[in-house]
Image (cartoon, helix red, strand yellow):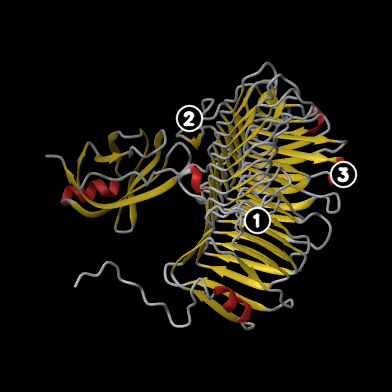
Amino acid sequence: MFVGALALAAPAGAVTCANLQTAINGVANGGTVTVNQGTCTGMSFTLPSHAPGFTYTIQGAGTGATFDGGASGNRILTGTDVGIVTLRNLTFENSTAPTGQNGGAVDIEGNSGVTIDSDRFFGNKVTGGTIMQGGAIHISSTSSSTVTIRNSTFGGATAASGNSSSGSGGAVTINNPGATSMQVIGSVFRRNTAGFAGGGLSESSNGTSGNPQVTLENSSFTQNSASADAGGAVLSSAHSLTVERNAFSHNSVVSNVDGSARGGALLAVGFPSAPNAPLTQIGNRFDANHIGQDGLRSSLAPGGGGEWVGGLDLTSRNDRFTSNSLAQAVGGGAEAEGGGLGLEGCGSLGTPTDVLENLVAAGNQIAGEGHGAGVYGGGCGGGTVHATVLDSTISGNRETGAGGSGGLAGGSGDTLKMRNSVVTANVGASLEGFATRTITNTDACVLGSPAPGPGNICKPPKLANPAPGHADVHETTLSPTINAGSNLFVPGPLTTDFEGQPRILNGVVDMGADEFKDGFGGVPILSKKAKVKKGKARVKVRCPKTAVGHCTGKLTLRSGGHGIGGRRFSIAAGKTKTLKVPLTRAAKVQLELGPLDHVLARTNAHDDIGTKKRKTRHIELKLAG
């Protein structure tokens, strides 16, 4: 008998597409609705209203349930005042909201808490102008509940798989002024587009109530774009924001409005109701994000090829900004600011105090007139920025216009303190705009024009590839930045360098974001038997190739618990040398009676960066005959 297909048995208690709405309407508090594995096409569902605290889950069976909207103009899932709902192991695709409505696949409003867990969203969209929000998901909650997106995927490898919004939040918009927390954890945003801002994600507390804690963690934002304003991947307006261990790459803002685009990957701004709110960033990578300017000449400066921060107190640790780019508006206008990172303090938002630790800003570019191709910090509306840069490297950044700066720039009223940091090999001025009286470079390595000010103590560093346009800031052997910093300026939490390798090594911190890892393991003793001639033992030793420069130290010989000879040495890395070690009178007398076996030979040596190591070996001494 020929069987054309085998039908999978539905799990016990699972419902079909046709019965799903009935099951949702009847779910008990704490209950779960499981949907059969398979596809529901062209169907819409409504989450009923529930009292706050009413909790339930809708989940897909097996490998998951798929809801295909069929691009019919009917949103898949809608709800108001839904209680606390979890959507798990579901796929929403090809869903288009009615024109002029938010949330292409999911729209949840009112007194609601929502968890999106291990779900997938492809090819969903909203249309109707730049006020529209949430190509895949729109959540606008007034409750003090948590909104969480965990282990979920928005968009894929093709442009068609991405979600889109004619306004903000190409994939997701969360407007939640009363939320206790908003979280995006372990999720992927790829190829989503927004006609205005927030190509992947737009979230806002609206600055009106509560004190929401917003977290972006362990997520990937790739090839998302915004077409008019800001935040190629993410637009965030929050009272408190944590961004930790995320990857932002190849996101973009291409402004066709007024040339004022900001935040090629991330735009984070505060509210006048909560000035100087905290922004904590740890271990993020901003790589090859871009702001392009197709708009007309504007008095508003485009800024932050990788990220723009406005009115928040930023603490950045182990963040990397590499190969991001920013273009001045077509037709001129305001000059671009911050090819990698831009910091702004506006009068209504307070005066930010920004601390950058183990920061790498390398290989970023401003095309045209601009300031701070690596990092920019400046004020607006009478505001200022106070920045401290610790154990960081700003290298190989480029500004292609006349004037401006390739390294780090700020306004005349802004302040800058640099400690244990390296600014080198940038095209354009190393430091620009900060009043001389506000620059302190103690224990810093700032090279280039103009003169960096008092406290600069460094010679040209030796980095792996500091050339403009490149981003390899690893120290190489013999760099004067190795063991040249001050341990006084290493914050307590800073126990690693920018790659997570241990810091401090060899007792003294290196300058810059990298802590040089020396492969020197000591000077080995090659001789197993050493001949003695004219009262001197011939002992062969080798300085390993992994040493930096030279091996310098002393070889000692001991027999019966007593020293019988010693010799200092300095040997180039990779070279072998036979040391002639003068012996004591007692040792010479003993050798006349016969060979000395079990002699302890020991080298105590260091290389040119001061790494000290010991090597030992038992050898035999015998008179040359």
Q: Say what secondary structure mark 1 lies in.
A: loop
Quarter of the rendering containing residue 286: top right
Q: Please give the residue where the numbered disc 1 appears in the rendered image.
A: 103
Can I make out residue 136 in this image? Answer: yes
In the image, residue 127 lies at what x, y percent? 65, 46
Query: In this rendering, would 426 be left or right of 545?
Result: right
Q: Amino acid at mark 2?
A: Asn
In the image, residue 270 lies at what x, y percent? 78, 49
Residue 465 bears which disc, if any? Answer: 2
Image point (28%, 40%), residue name: 541
Q: Residues within 10 Å of mark 3 (few under 14, many from 20)?
A: some
Location of residue 446 with respect to 622 vertically, above or below: above
**Tag nearer the camera, 2 or 3:** 3
Q: Residues within 10 Å of mark 2 (few under 14, many from 20)?
A: some
Quarter of the rendering containing residue 434: top right
Q: Please give the residue where the numbered disc 3 appears in the rendered image.
A: 348
Mark 1 / mark 3, whichever is N-terminal:
1
Location of residue 21 with respect to 174 vertically, above or below: below
104 or 112: which is nearer to us? 104
In the image, residue 222 lies at what x, y percent? 53, 45
Mark 1 / mark 2, whichever is N-terminal:
1
Q: Residues within 10 Å of mark 1 (few under 14, many from 20)?
A: many
